[in-house]
Image (tube, helix red, strand yellow):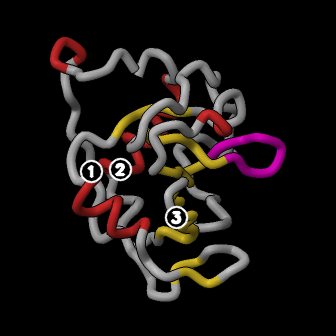
């Protein structure tokens, strides 16, 4: 949370308040990303007064699968919408999207299943709704973290 504190605070608060419950993964770009978030495509949910805010920075590189990053809205602001990288190298997102975390559990058995759902072009919207049932966060102490992000 020290590299991107506003984004981390926003995401963790929304997770711990269960604000993501009932929201959908609204875009699946196979072998690239899955996108979801409270408010779905509109994304008008967040902990800050305007619900959207400028990202802290873009310093974390998109260099691995399972990376959490914020979806940009109008004017480059972020809100509750996020994506999870599927590809090992997602450098196309560097300097454009603010990464802030990594999936430590459930990548193979949950994220990869979402990545394989049938979608409706051109928006790549899943043909069958993929909903978040419950949200929360497991905080891993920095000393035991597997990355320096």
User: For the magenta stretch, what is the residue range?
Assistant: 72-78
Badge 2: residue crowd in 10 Å (few <14, some 14–19, many ≥20): some
Disc 1 to disc 2: CB gap under 8 Å: yes
Location of mark 2 (residue): 15
Q: Nearer the viewer, residue 57 or 104?
A: 104
Q: Secondary structure at mark 1?
A: loop
Residue at 49% across / 30% down in the picture? Answer: 63
Q: Which residue is mark 1?
A: 136
* Residue 118 locus on image (x, y percent): 49, 82
Disc marking residue 30: 3
Q: Position of residue 68 (x, y in %)?
A: 45, 42
Residues at marks 1 and 2, CA–CA distance in whole angstroms: 4 Å
Circle 2 or circle 3, nearest the eye = 3
| Residue depicted at x 59% and y 19% | 59
| Disc nearer the start of the sequence (2/3) | 2
Q: Position of residue 132 (x, y in %)?
A: 35, 68
Task: Say whether residue 64 is magenta.
Answer: no
């Amino acid at each position: 949370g020290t590299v991107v504190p506003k984004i981390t605070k926003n995401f963790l608060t929304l997770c711990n308040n269960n604000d993501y419950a009932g929201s959908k993964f609204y875009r699946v770009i196979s072998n690239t990303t899955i996108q979801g978030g409270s408010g779905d495509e509109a994304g008008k949910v967040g902990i800050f007064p305007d619900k959207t805010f400028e990202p802290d920075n873009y310093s974390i590189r998109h260099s691995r699968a399972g990376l959490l990053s914020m979806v940009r809205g109008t004017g480059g602001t972020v809100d509750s919408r996020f994506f999870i990288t599927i590809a090992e190298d997602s450098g196309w997102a560097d300097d454009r999207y603010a990464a802030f975390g990594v999936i430590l559990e459930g990548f193979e058995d949950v994220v990869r299943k979402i990545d394989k759902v049938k979608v409706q072009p051109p928006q790549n919207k899943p043909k069958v709704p993929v909903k978040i049932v419950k949200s929360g966060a497991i905080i891993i102490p920095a000393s035991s973290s597997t990355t320096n992000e």
